[in-house]
Amino acid sequence: MIHVTRSLVRTWTESLLHIHDSPRRTAAAYAVGVFFGFSPFLGFHTVLALLVAFLFNLNRVAVVLGVYSNLPWFLAPYYTITTVAAAEVLGVRMPPHFAHQFRALLDFPFVGREFWTGLATLVSPLVWPFTLGSMIGAAGLSLVAYIVARPFIDAGRRHRRLRGPHHPPEAR
């Protein structure tokens, strides 16, 4: 009975995660995750990426790994650089004394109306540069992710095939 249950769980898990893809599709799944991880859809990136993974039957593990390639210490520099670059291309000027005005907003309570209306007024000219910049940046990074991930996945699959499916790990 336990053997049947274990087999059923393994089959269900492999079906859910879709882990037996070709290296090309696995690298593409990772690239899709990277795209959503660096897209302007902050807060919704995991849900959207998994939705696309289920829709196109992609490797869910690779997609989630791609989404979470955007580590917290990358967030501020990435979004700042892409927003400023897109603002330059679009001819949008940064609000005068942006940093000073932002620091002044921090004097208001975070849950207060003054903070949120002031923030909306301050960043409203940057909505399109933020969106366009991070979309283009996400597309570029996802292309790089595919190009870099594909040889690693190919090498890993070759290595696993050479060692055999039930070969015990080497002792250290």
Image (cartoon, grey):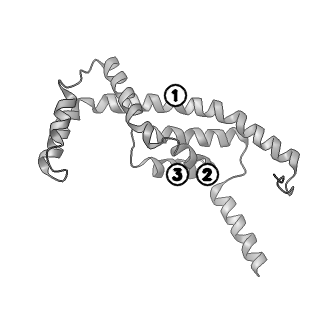
Q: Which tag, 2 or 1, sits closer to the chain's start?
A: 2
Q: Which tag, 3 or 1, sits closer to the chain's start?
A: 3
Numbered label attached to residue 120: none
Which of 38 and 14 lies nearest the eye of the viewer? Answer: 38
Image quadrant in which you'd find residue 124: top left
Numbered label attached to residue 50: 3
Q: Which residue is situated farthest in the left direction here?
A: 114
Marks 3 and 1 sit apart, C-alpha to C-alpha, by 20 Å
Amino acid type shown at disc 3: Leu
Q: Which tag, 3 or 2, sits closer to the chain's start?
A: 3
Which of 137 and 167 lies nearest the eye of the viewer? Answer: 167
Look at 66% across and 63% down and name the residue there.
Answer: 13
The residue carrying mark 2 is: 61
Quarter of the picture containing the N terminus is: bottom right
Say if mark 3 contacts mark 2, CB within 8 Å: no
Amino acid type shown at disc 2: Val
- Side of 158 where 74 appears, left or right: left
Q: Residues within 10 Å of mark 3 (few under 14, many from 20)?
A: many
Look at 52% across and 31% down and name the residue there.
Answer: 141
**How far from the left and from the top, in percent, is residue 48?**
46, 48
In the rendered view, tell whether residue 151 sits above or below residue 65: above
**How far from the left and from the top, in percent, is residue 33?**
54, 43
**How far from the left and from the top, in percent, is residue 99?**
22, 30
Marks 2 and 1 sit apart, C-alpha to C-alpha, by 21 Å
